[in-house]
Amino acid sequence: MRSEEQQRNAIAFSRYYPTRYTGKSNDTTYGMFDFNSLFEFSRANCVAICAFLVPANLFLTLRTMVFTGLQRPQSQVQQAAVFACIPAVVMILHVYTWFMIGVVMAPTYILLWLGSTALSINLWAIIHPQSMVHLFTALLTMLPFEISTSLRK
């Protein structure tokens, strides 16, 4: 049997965390989204999430860069860039769930760098694609003559 103080603490605790710890809901939490469950899901399935997000970021950002370099219509470049921003933002938010609980390791920083770089390249393609095209043409002219002539055809 619980003591009176334990009973008061349990009641007070259940007011703040009604669904997660007691299995019961009150009117203040009904209909609200529980971010803790989403964060726990993100951390529990980290390997699967990263196994999808890393190649998705690389492939979709590369696709945006190719569309920009080939000077495709601006609507296609913007569509590709916006679509590529989604996994980049999801990866950044996924890394922040690890930072929230204090996990500070090399993989978290590497994934944060990857997501931030992908996001910035995609935003660059949306905001100022002409400068990206100029960079690509400058890099293309720096290649050896044999390679650059075959790429220009």
Image: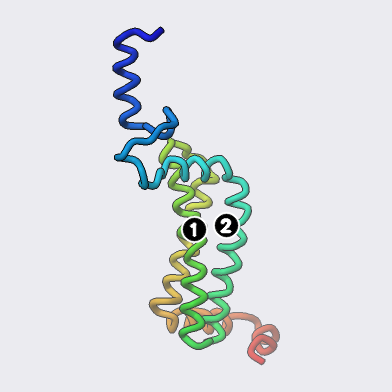
Residue identifier under label 1: 115
Q: How is the image coloured?
A: rainbow
Q: Residues within 10 Å of mark 2 (few under 14, many from 20)?
A: many
Q: Earlier in the sequence, mark 1 or mark 2?
A: 2
Q: Position of residue 118 (x, y in %)?
A: 50, 64
Q: Position of residue 15 (x, y in %)?
A: 31, 30
Kind of residue at badge 2: Leu
The reply, left or right, for residue 7 in relation to residue 73 is left
Secondary structure of the residue carrying tag 1 is helix
Task: From the top left corner, tell me how far across and down residue 139 is, in percent.
Answer: 55, 79
Rendered position, 37 above or below 10? below
Q: CA distance from mark 1 to mark 2?
A: 9 Å
Look at the picture and state if 97 lies above or below 146: above
Position of the N terminus, as image quadrant, is top left
Callout 1–callout 2 Cβ contact below 8 Å: yes
Q: Quadrant of the C terminus?
A: bottom right
Between residue 82 and residue 26, name the one nearer to us. 26
- The quadrant holding residue 120 is bottom left
Which of the two residues, 117 or 56, is positioned nearer the viewer here? Answer: 56
Quadrant of residue 20 within the rendered picture:
top left
Q: At 49% from the left edge and 40% from the top edge, which residue is drawn?
A: 40
Secondary structure, mark 2, is helix
Q: Amino acid at mark 1?
A: Gly
- Labelled disc at residue 57: none
Residue 52 lies, with reference to residue 137, above or below; the image says above
Q: For mark 1, does the 10 Å Cα neighbourhood hold few (<14), some (14 to 19), or many (20 or more) residues? A: many
Residue 53 numbered tag: 2
- 56 shown above or below 92: below
Between circles 1 and 2, the one closer to the viewer is 2
* Residue found 30% across the figure and 40% down from its top: 28
